[in-house]
Image: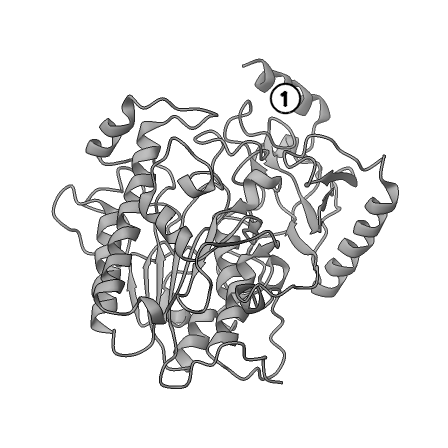
Amino acid sequence: MAIPILYSCGKENKPNIILINVDDLGYKDLGFMGSTYYETPNLDQLAGQGMVFYHAYAAAANCAPSRASLMSGRNTPRHGVYTVDNSERGNAKTRKIIPTPNRDFLPDSLYTLAKMLKDNGYTNGTFGKWHINEDPLQHGFHVNVGGAHHGNPGRNGYFSPYNISFIEDGPEGEYLTDRLTREAIAFIEANQSKPFFVNLAFYSVHTPIMGKESLIEKFKNKPGREGQDRADYAAMVASVDENVGKLLQVLDELNLSDNTLLIFTSDNGGIRDISYQDPLRAGKGSYYEGGIRIPLVIRWPGKIPAGTTSDVPVTHMDFYPTIRSIIEVEQVGEENWDGMDLAPLFKQESQAERPLFWHFPVYLQAYNPKEDGGRDPLFRTRPGSVVRKGKWKLHHYFEEDDYELYNLEEDPGETTNLAEREPEIRDQLIKMLEGWRKEVHAPVPNQSNPHYDKAFEMNLINEKLNE
């Protein structure tokens, strides 16, 4: 079955694809998303040139599963990457059930976005964080700079000499965000005469928080507000913005802007201990809104009207089917995508309301018990699943078979659990969630952990609350 063609590109004029994926950038860490502390003039300009999605979601609340889902177009149960490293996070005495084992790498058998583009005449380069196997060349890229299984650049790693693989050291003190952008620009210049795919995956703004000293000084005396006040983090955001500006300028100079589909996003929510996303609750690692709501801009001059916005809930997993639709690839066999083609939204056509699902059958401990805003002071999240449909969002946590229901239209901060007050809505979403889990063979752990100690857990919770 052929995917409906909404934009006829022609075999000789396929658009270039650039995906800029910033690590741990929060929903409100940009000027065009409402921040008055961080300065992002280039990204603000980009937002005015494309479509801003105000209800965009990461496919998962932390790095590896989010990236695995983006590259495969599949939700976590279809590839088994649920978290980073071990699924048994936190103290064993505080885990009530035995979590599902985690897969560290995206299976080689999956037909990734990069493989699909490679098979359709694209030259592919990835620059920066990869995190879903040891070498992205195995998943369809021709060029790799700085991408392996590293989740962050390591101690002092934002300045050369570097601690990551597949990159040569630059001059001492060279900043990694600058270097990755220069490498991406060189790739674009070398491949400008044919369709290319650039995956520019900055390690910024992941920890360790390390900005250029000149930019840190710029923000030291600037008043912050609403939990956004760290000069070193603001410097990292500013460096990302500067480098996106450099990339956009090169596209203009090479006359490539009009034939380039550019996506700017983040891999998951921001770390609440570093930058608040109020009114959204919690942050990275949590399946409350602060952990999965992300910034998203898509620009394609002449095809996506400039200065437009969308409130339709969308997800990382939508990128794959959208790009495949745009480049006019025939769908052969069963792909098992979990996203939808966003092209009708680019034309501001209405879309049927669909549910979004998340599945996280593992544990993830808290950063800062007083700041994280998760389920409790010990964990950012515990094993569970989530569904959003329209304004309603249901959480299901497996330890106690517990449900939380929120009306995001009236309560974006997820402060009032309506599970008992809205039983009809709750039960509809439970049925929907259970049906989806059955369809995708999502594992639901229910085996008791023999090491769990309730008294120990309660004492530890009290200690954390009183720190």
The quadrant of the image that shows the C terminus is top right
Q: Is residue 309 left or right of residue 447?
A: left
Q: How many marks?
A: 1
Q: Residue furthest right?
A: 424
Q: In percent of the image, x 60 and y 40: which residue is there?
A: 289
Q: Residue at x 52, y 66 (%)?
A: 72
User: In this orientation, which residue lies closer to the viewer: 65 or 121?
Assistant: 121
Assess disc 1: are there few (<14), some (14-19) or many (≥20) residues with their C-alpha within 10 Å of its C-alpha: some
Q: In this picture, is 155 found above or below 120?
A: above
- The residue at which mark 1 appears reads as 461
Colour scheme of the rendered structure: one colour
Three-letter code, disc 1: Ile
Q: Is residue 66 left or right of residue 178?
A: right
* Spot occupied by residue 208 in the image (x, y as percentages of width and height): 34, 36
Asked which secondary structure carries label 1, the reply is helix
Q: Residue furthest left?
A: 171
In front of the other: 447 or 83: 83
Q: Quadrant where the N terminus lies?
A: bottom right
Q: Residue 251: which quarter of the image?
A: bottom left
Residue 167 visible somewhere in the drawing: no
Residue 232 visible in rendering: yes
Residue 297: image location, x then y, percent: 45, 54
Against 316, is 213 above or below? above
Residue 186: image x %, image y %? Answer: 20, 64
Q: Residue furthest top?
A: 466
Of residues 401 and 251, the one drawn nearer to the viewer in this rendering: 251
Coordinates of residue 281 in the picture (x, y in percent):
59, 33
